[in-house]
Image (cartoon, rainbow, N blue to C red):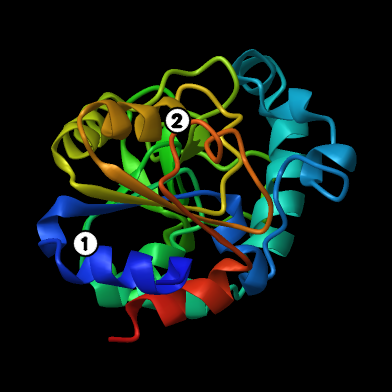
Amino acid sequence: MDRLSEAKALIKETEKDKIVVFSGAGISIASGIPPFRGKDGLWSKYDPTVFDIDFFLTQPAKSWHYIKEIFYSYLLKDVKPNAAHYAVAKLGCPVITQNIDGLHQAAGSKEVVEFHGTAETLVCVDCKKRYNRKEVNLNVEIPRCRCGGILKPDFVFFKEPIPQHAFDRSIELAENCKVMIVVGTTGEIMPASRIPYLAKRHGAKIIEVNVAASNFTYEITDIFLKGKAEEILPLLVEE
């Protein structure tokens, strides 16, 4: 049996609520969103310091200049899910994603745990009220809450903790799943990269879909499917 057929058989024999997808930047590349790291990543073009929480709080105007330029005028403007997101939605299982783009939800996935938060909402640093980004006028130097506080994208900046509810739910899903499909992530970002290891320790089989070997491949992966997420995942779930 080839690796793809083996993975399909494993998925077919596993209850949907016992399968978890763990996704990273690689799943969204076909939607036009580049990764942050690597030769052509965003951090090769921009200084990541502007996404340090201390920098944001002390120089919000400068930080917001780059936030708008990178995320709301470029990366996330008119992006749509690709075949990989739709394939994951078709599986009907929970998703833990490191991405902040909201594309899993847009494709129809019902439970999406956003480990690093989301760019789809903004949160007030003072009163903690949240707004959908489409409700907020971003054509100002510093977007503000009705209370006057500075609004911040609701994703994790450097030096910020992982949202507690996302962390707790990710742990719960990892400890209770029988199959984890790891897709589009190199396994370099802590603490997110520990989630597949936790699933493995609790007996889960690991199916990995990546264009190249990752930190997971030779340590915990049971079935490695080399290729682009938007090509492999539709084949994986076609039945």
Figure quadrant of the N terminus = bottom left
Q: Please report whichever mark, 1 or 2, sits nearer to the chain's N-terminal start.
A: 1
Residue shown at the point (29%, 46%) measured from the top left: 205
Counting the numbered discs, the total is 2
Which residue is the site of mark 1? 93
Quarter-of-image position of residue 37: top right
Q: What type is the residue that disc 2 sits on? A: Ala
Q: Give the number of the disc on residue 192.
A: 2
Q: Position of residue 200 (x, y in %)?
A: 31, 33
The extreme bottom residue here reads: 239
Q: Is residue 141 left or right of residue 26?
A: right
Decide which of 46, 35 is in the foreground and name it.
35
Residue 132 falls left or right of residue 172: right
CB-based contact (under 8 Å), mark 1 and mark 2: no
The secondary structure type at the circle numbered 1 is loop
Q: Residues within 10 Å of mark 2 (few under 14, many from 20)?
A: many
Point 63% across, 66% down: residue: 227
Q: Residue at x 72, y 32 (%)?
A: 63
Label 1 – label 2 distance at C-alpha: 19 Å
Q: Nearest the camera: 29 or 70?
A: 29
Instruction: Please state the horizontal and vertical placement of residue 32, each as a whole percent of the image.
Output: 69, 69
Residue 83, label in figure: none
Residue name at image x 63 percent, y 13 percent: 54
